Image (spheres, rainbow, N blue to C red):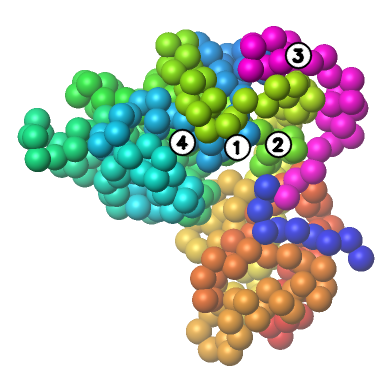
Amino acid sequence: MDIIDLRSDTVTQPTPEMREVMARAEVGDDVYGEDPTVNRLQELAAGMTGQEAGLFVASGTMGNLAAVLAHCGRGDEVIVGNKAHTFLYEAGGVSALGGVHSSQLPNQPDGSLRLEDLAAAIRPDDAHMPITRLICLENTHNRCGGTCQTVEYTLRVAAFTHARGLAVHLDGARLFNAAVALGVAAKDLAGAVDSVTFCLSKGLCAPVGSLLCGSRAFIHKAHRVRKLLGGGMRQAGVLAAAGIVALETMVDRLADDHLRARQLADGLRQVAGLDLAPGSPATNMVFLRLADGIPLSARDVATRLKESSILVGVTGERQFRLVTHYWVSDEGVDRAVEAFRSVLN
């Protein structure tokens, strides 16, 4: 029986078209800036995000780390949400490798940071304190349910930040999910910030890689940081070719993932013993928990689901995250719902 893997959209595999273009990609030495396929991908990414230049990096974590290190010096401070991926899941790299201090503010249920909280967190000119340099946003917001930050909100934060001489970095790992869900272009969500990362290897189905985009001057600095982090990948056009296919053919179809997430949520609402998070799904993530009275833990349920070839993400003692993607079909959604019903009833 085929496995239905709902743990994350990171499990996506390259499409047949991607495998074909990877096999015949024109390549060069990207560390010298001579890989034509990487160069094309970087230009395409910059244009789609409303930025001047792009930089191909190995992962979203590398992109976010390179961005913070390019914006901040040792002892400077970055303001992040307390549920931000950069704070929770990137191994403390900004501090461990960059000596950058972080200030964590409470994310609101939709993933946003309140302007009042940002204003209160910006440090005064005081020798006893770190210097605030950067504010980080996330879109879509993973830990807040795959929620979308709107164009209007992003513009407000950018204007607020720039008026105070600070910069804004957007962790847009699933930026195109947000754009499709909101019915806007990615550049409308990213054009006003100072830098943005997005992943090719999640819902866009490419096997490896992310893009960091910003001004030419910023990308020049980030390129040096990428080298520091060991991110020069030489003949990386083999990977970049799949990224080009991802950006040219896989963005609009993200709407299918969102639709299947809603179908999955609708089915799971009918299963006794499950409670869905309010508003879930916002995009391609369904968050749910075991109802009171169910004697099993989430880990117990996940183990039993695996026996039916259904893989799910466990996010707490009684909580799950299910993520739809290119390799989850309508049949897979139905099988997942029936498997939950069988385990719980």
The answer to whether residue 3 shows anywhere in this view is: yes
* Mark sitting on residue 332: none
- SS type, badge 3: loop
Residue at the (68%, 30%) spot, across then down: 251
Q: Quadrant of the N terminus?
A: bottom right
Placement of 324 over or under 35, stated as above or below: below
Which circle's residue, 2 or 3, is located before the other in the chain? Answer: 3
* Mark sitting on residue 28: 3
| Viewer-nearest of discs 2 and 3 | 3
- SS type, badge 2: loop
Q: Which residues are magenta?
A: 11-38
Q: Residues within 10 Å of mark 3 (few under 14, many from 20)?
A: some
Which circle's residue, 4 or 3, is located before the other in the chain? Answer: 3
The alpha-carbon separation of the residues under discs 2 and 1 comes to: 7 Å
Residue labelled with disc 4: 65
The alpha-carbon separation of the residues under discs 4 and 3 comes to: 26 Å
Contact (Cβ within 8 Å) of mark 3 with mark 1: no
Asked if the magenta segment contains residue 20, the reply would be: yes
Query: Residue type at mark 2?
Result: Val
The answer to whether residue 183 shows anywhere in this view is: no
Which circle's residue, 4 or 2, is located before the other in the chain? Answer: 4
Measured as percent of width and height from the top left, residue 59 is found at: 60, 37
The alpha-carbon separation of the residues under discs 1 and 4 comes to: 10 Å
